[in-house]
Image (spheres, rainbow, N blue to C red):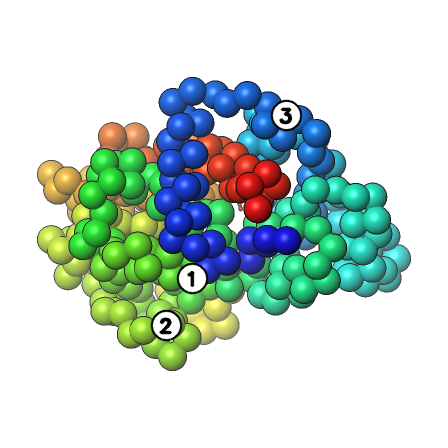
Amino acid sequence: MQHLVDTDNFSDVQITQLLSDAKRFKAKRPPQLLHDKLLITLFFEASTRTRSSFEVAAKRLGAAVVHLDPSRSSSKKGESLEDTFANLCAMEPDGVIIRHAENETPQRLADMQTTPVINAGAGNYAHPTQALLDLFTIVEHFDGDIKGKTIAIVGDIVSSRVAASGIRLLERMGLNVLLVAPKQFMPEPSSLNKALPQYEKLEDVMDKVDVIMSLRAQLERHETELFENYDDYAKQYCISKERMGNRDILVLHPGPVMRNIDISDDMLSDPRCKVLTQVKNGVYMRMAILKLLLLDS
Ligand code: CP
């Protein structure tokens, strides 16, 4: 039984297959490959993109989807997460897609070996489907020529599961990863697989990068007050047309975007910014992931 807790669950061959299937599905909608499958989604944290993208992906492939809303479930009556999961598994779904605030939850449920577990975001540890759709968007943009390209991840890196999974996957795929953030948003080098170049000023990397991945500033997650308000943060880290100049840099953001804090209004409507392409590609990549986990494994 194969799970997706983080992208290291997939071999290089499987990642190549995912990229190829996602590209194929985007070019031509596939037949209902998963018409006899049923997935359950269990989101303990809010989501716009990931939950709806999984549902669209599953339905495009003919699978049925059942949502359990944890705020109206028996977890409110004290049922443990493991018992909730075991009860859902007793209904024989073909997979459970889970988002949870704790880093370890998807692995703990995967270890029960009752149904494939798909991590839709866990704490600040991993968001593998976001990393894979970001990789697909970068591969598509550079027509496959990604080895040696340089990406700057900008913003609240320490709080970000998107950054955590992205760093691991993009490095593995041969990109150079730079981190740009104020000190308190920067992860400890010991928490990374290897020390990555760290910068405090965005201006210091603008002429070195092919891709910028902006992250949502999550000032509320930090105990120390770094900035008096979001405007002060934006002055240093907002990706604006003025900062970009005429540089040919691909701009990404996993969403939700805080307009004029993470990325400016004018940059969001600039063709170099592919935020909505990421969302579109997310459906095709999740279709490829569901096919791999439910049909090919
Ligand atoms: N990118 C992402 O995980 O967005 P949601 O929180 O809306 O799912």
Q: Amino acid at mark 2?
A: Asn
Q: Nearer the viewer, mark 3 or mark 2?
A: 3
Residue at the (32%, 73%) spot, across then down? 194
Marks 3 and 2, the one that precedes in the sequence: 3
Residue 6 left/right relative to 228: right
Residue at the (37%, 72%) spot, across then down? 193
Q: Secondary structure at mark 2?
A: loop
Q: From this viewpoint, is residue 112 visible? A: yes
Residue 256 left/right relative to 297: left
Q: Determine the residue located farthest toward the bottom in the rendered image.
A: 190
Nearest the camera: 251 or 15? 15
Where residue 113 sits: x, y (%)?
Answer: 70, 59
Q: Is mark 3 within 8 Å of ligand 1?
A: no
Q: Amino acid at mark 1?
A: Ala
Marks 1 and 3, the one that precedes in the sequence: 3
Q: Quadrant of residue 273?
A: top left
Q: Secondary structure at mark 1?
A: helix
Nearest the camera: 59 or 217? 59
Q: Which residue is mark 2?
A: 193
Q: Nearer the viewer, mark 1 or mark 3?
A: 3
Disc marking residue 164 = 1
Q: Which residue is mark 3?
A: 62
Q: Secondary structure at mark 3?
A: loop
Q: Amino acid at mark 3?
A: Gly
Residue at the (46%, 43%) spot, across then down? 256
Residue at the (64%, 47%) spot, across then down? 97
Whole-number angstrom distance, CA of label 2 to CA of label 1: 10 Å
Where residue 78 sits: x, y (%)?
Answer: 86, 62
Q: Nearer the viewer, mark 2 or mark 1?
A: 2
